[in-house]
Amino acid sequence: MNKLMITTALAASLVAGTATAQDRIRWQVPMGFPSTLAGLADAMPWVADQLRAATDGRIDLRVAEPGTVIPAFGIFEAVGDGSIDAGYAWMGYELGTLPSAALFGALPFGLESSEYLAWMYHHGGRDLMTKAYEPFNIHMIPCGTISPEGAGWFREELETVEDLDGLRFRAAGLGGEIMSELGKSVTVIPGGEIYQALETGAIDAAEFSLPSADMQLGFYQVASYYYLPGWHQPSTNQALYVNLDSWNGLSEIDQNLIEMACMAANSYALSKAEAMQGPTLVELEEKGVNLRNYSDDFIEAFRDAHHTVMERRSAEDPLFAEIYQSMTEFQATNRRWKEFGYLPRDWQTRIGE
């Protein structure tokens, strides 16, 4: 028995003595992504399993696949209005309704996964998340931070930044808005519809998620050039959305159990995502995929468009500006540590193994 299971067993023994029939929690939890996408969407099923183990089934969060209860992009509205007690999704999908939410989902050129968690739990991020979502009657719990995403699947190799102009591109969140700034025609469609859209030519290129999830969805079969790094999502962050009335109706013990399970899920999700991507890139190359790093010219163009979008959004929305400033200030403060505390990523290439 691993340490987590020992912990959950101890928690179960403590809670069992006070549980009554009225304490039982049966929530359906619709997902924004199919739970079968390993490394991306399996953190929430894992949380549900841990909570059932810790409470002998008393807390039963029943994961529902996208579209079976509500549309994949409908979790924010459905949780807020009380149509469902809880849901699990990526926060970038709220860009149109709650622009500041997209910062929590992923900040282009922003916080990497470990930095995001440091900011969230120790530098005011959680308070800002509460400030953003509570007016919509939602209690948010960070619940699955993962590695950077791939930056896009293309049918043809990109020679210059001008090659992006006019491309019909699937993207989401702030990264999608930045790509629009560079002339792409950006559309947002669920992950399960991207393959067909690429295959039929409805879109020219797409980004979705981790290399492992992209491979699982078969994008390599319809687009052979895969560009990285994921400048648009240096970390990808998901959350458990809970209707605020439903949350306030829980005992403090149950609130703490759910919070702890989701905090553990961040470690589970990130470690699994990191474990999968190296072998995935090897396998993609074996399948004939051409891996490409964006050149400095592309990165510079993305960065300049990023500044334009961030300045515009900050001027339009004081809460967006507050959250963005908090994230960038922490990133700047932490940069010195990253420069001095960590080996350069290319040290083995530069000096040999």
Image: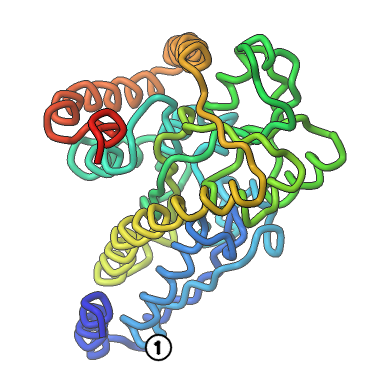
Q: Is residue 135 among the parts visible in the rendering?
A: no
Q: Position of residue 92 (x, y in %)?
A: 52, 37
Q: Position of residue 151 (x, y in %)?
A: 55, 33
The residue positioned 30% from the left and 86% from the top of the image is: 19
In this orientation, which residue lies closer to the viewer: 224 or 184? 224
Q: Which residue is mark 1?
A: 21
Left or right: where 335 falls relative to 305: left
Q: Is 319 above or below relative to 23? A: above
The residue positioned 48% from the left and 72% from the top of the image is: 61
Quarter of the picture holding the N terminus: bottom left
The residue positioned 64% from the left and 42% from the top of the image is: 289
User: Number of numbered discs present?
Assistant: 1
The crowd level at tag 1 (other Cα within 10 Å; few <14, some 14-19, many 20+) is few
Residue projecting furthest to the front: 352
The residue positioned 73% from the left and 44% from the top of the image is: 194
- Which amino acid, mark 1? Ala
Q: Position of residue 344 (x, y in %)?
A: 24, 31
In this orientation, which residue lies closer to the viewer: 344 or 49? 344
Q: Is 309 above or below relative to 54? A: above
Mark 1 secondary-structure assignment: helix
Q: Is residue 267 among the parts visible in the rendering?
A: yes
Q: Is 182 above or below relative to 2? A: above
Quarter of the picture holding the C terminus: top left
- Image quadrant assignment for residue 114: top left
Q: Position of residue 342 (x, y in %)?
A: 17, 35
